[in-house]
Image (tube, rainbow, N blue to C red):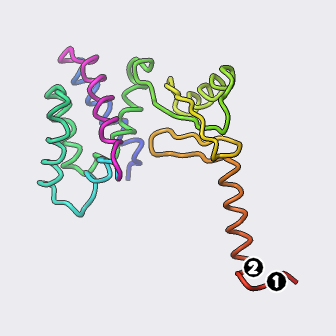
Amino acid sequence: MPSDAMVARRYARALYELAGEAGLTDAVQTALGRVADVLDSGDPPVLELLGSPAFSIAERRSMLERVLEPLGVPGLVRSFLLLALDRHRIRLLPQVRVAWCALGDGDACRVRATVATARPLAPGTVEDVRGALAGLTGGPVELTARTDPSLLGGAVVQMGDTVWDASLRSRLEAMERSLLSTHPAGTRAP
């Protein structure tokens, strides 16, 4: 059975070849990025809803159509997404986008990420974080740095639906949970 990554690469290659034949490579790449960003938004993300068996295929198709309508995506992208939805592969869209970027101009397929720290980061540190994330994604990263004094120290990095929490606040909370589970309220350590 092929892995999700292999399937995503096949879908990306097929879309890339069709876009090339139609002379729509740039338009499809732009639309793919816009659609991926929109489907990754919401709580829960729209992509999660589109993959949910709680909705019928007809309901999911209708939901996808409503999302695509204001975006003005090329017909090729619309057809591709509906096919992926019908074949229960819509959840692979982020991987398809990464595979697409590997086939084409990776510079135009920037991944967005945020890093939150207790104090503002020095420009060199921001570049170091951007470089580390680019190494993980295999492409350029558009990084937004923000401050959150409640973190106390360390950093929280979010890229898509992945979060790396290396903040002092989360470490202290983990330590508290560990201590409370070891010594429930009202008991004393020996």
Depicted 74 relative to depicted 184: above or below: above
Closest to the observer, 158 or 153: 153
Q: Main secondary structure of the magenta part?
A: helix
Q: Which image quadrant is residue 58 in?
A: bottom left
Q: What is the three-letter code of the residue carrying label 1?
A: Arg
Looking at the image, residue 119 sits to the left or right of residue 140; the answer is right
Instruction: Measuring from the top left, give residue 27's x and y in whole percent.
Output: 24, 19
Residue 181 sits inside the magenta stretch: no
| Structural crowding at the residue carrying mark 2, measured as other residues with C-alpha within 10 Å and reported as few (<14), some (14–19) or many (≥20) | few
Image: magenta residue range: 21-43
Could you tell me which residue is drawn at 38 percent across and 20 percent down? 104
Q: Which residue is mark 1?
A: 188
Instruction: Measuring from the top left, give residue 56's x and y in whole percent.
Output: 16, 59
Whole-number angstrom distance, CA of label 1 to CA of label 2: 7 Å
Instruction: Measuring from the top left, give residue 110's x and y in whole percent.
Output: 44, 25
Could you tell me which residue is drawn at 71 percent across and 69 percent down? 178
Q: Residue furthest front?
A: 149
> Are the two marked residues, 1 and 2, in contact with CB atoms closer than 8 angstroms?
yes
SS of the residue at dot 2?
Answer: loop
Say whether disc 1 or disc 2 marks the residue closer to the N-terminus.
2
Looking at the image, residue 163 sits to the left or right of residue 86; the answer is right
Residue 35 sits inside the magenta stretch: yes
| Structural crowding at the residue carrying mark 1, measured as other residues with C-alpha within 10 Å and reported as few (<14), some (14–19) or many (≥20) | few
Closest to the observer, 63 or 139: 63
Looking at the image, residue 24 sits to the left or right of residue 162; the answer is left
SS of the residue at dot 1?
Answer: loop
Q: What is the three-letter code of the residue carrying label 2?
A: His
Q: Which residue is mark 2?
A: 183
Closest to the observer, 20 or 44: 44
Could you tell me which residue is drawn at 35 percent across and 51 percent down? 43
